Amino acid sequence: MNRFPETRIRPRHSATSEFLQLLISWTLRFLLPTSMCVAQRAPGQWVPPAALRDVPVLANCQMTKHGVGVSLQPTLFYPHGAIFLCPEREREIDRRRPGASRFFLVHEYGHLAMRTREEAVADEWAAKQLAGVPVEQGTLRAVLLFFVDEGTLFDPLYGTGFDRALRVARTADIPESNWPPPLVAFAKAQEGLRTHGTSLILRVKSGDANAAQMVICVDRKPIGVLSNVDGKGRLELPMLVPGPHLIQALQVWLYQTESSSGEKSEVARKLQAECEFVSTGKHTIVIELRFSGDTLSMRADEF
């Protein structure tokens, strides 16, 4: 145990003393509800890359808001970042598809490895990591079935269950012959959407930011995530009928990305913008964002 010399606080330093006591009290309140997850690892299971092995994995359903998991990028309290898991939610997932919850742990490591908020990127990272470990093929099969069970249930940050299943299956190079039949049917429908639907393409026009990610709503209905931070800056949606439409960009995060190193620095967060748009039925719409000062504006043009 480290020992420190006794320090006497004089009355004129009482304000500093009270501040330190409050800081310690707040820190303890923050840490006490959290417990360390100590998972049993079978021989040959996936382990985090060396750069992520000091990341604490903590059990705290309040931090995950009763979702399965959440990650924090490095902070003062968590210099290596942190992962929080909800054991209740993990057990619920594994009751439905035994072993599937492990994918979500690797998914959270993906956020830290790629330094991204994008759920699709974390899904793909996790799928690639698990695909390289023979023992984890069962994890991939289980989570594939879990996502197919979710079906058309939609979340603007993740897409549908089918979207996530297709993402995992393709990234992990799972042969289509091993896909569940509903996923095969969904993949064929997606090909038709690319041919006959509408594509949104993102462009960011600003000296301070050259990349962005956001949730797109069309006529006040959430469609999905449009981003050129780690992805291709493209979002597919059903063909828009000719006529006026309202396009909204919500939860917009702006970044400056260095072309040489790929490093990202955050410029602004949680912005929003919208614009009216009249479609003539063309297949491609360019969404252009402009950020000036602290104001975000957008326009949409058919291409």
Image (cartoon, helix red, strand yellow):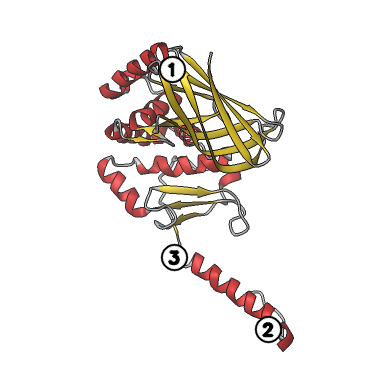
Give the quadrant of the N terminus. bottom right
Q: Say which residue appears at 39% left-offset and 56% top-offset.
A: 61
Q: Amino acid at mark 2?
A: Ser
**Residue 260's image quarter?**
top right
* 257 vs 95: above or below: above
Residue 10 visible (yes or no): no
Q: Work out which residue is located at the far bottom of the displayed protein and give it.
A: 11
**Residue 264's image quarter?**
top right
CB within 8 Å, label 3 to label 2? no
The dot on residue 14 is 2
The dot on residue 33 is 3
As drawn, is 188 to the left or to the right of 43?
left
Q: Amino acid at mark 1?
A: Thr
Q: Amino acid at mark 3?
A: Pro
Q: Say which residue appears at 46% left-offset and 56% top-offset.
A: 58
Report, in whole angstroms, how far the alpha carbon at label 1 lies from the one at label 3: 47 Å
Answer with mark 3 or mark 2, whichever residue precedes in sequence: 2
Q: Say which residue appears at 62% left-offset and 39% top-offset.
A: 295
Q: Say which residue appears at 29% left-offset and 48% top-offset.
A: 92
Residue 67, given in percent of the width and then of the height, sits at 38, 48
Report, in whole angstroms, how far the alpha carbon at label 3 lies from the one at label 2: 30 Å
* 121 vs 271: above or below: above
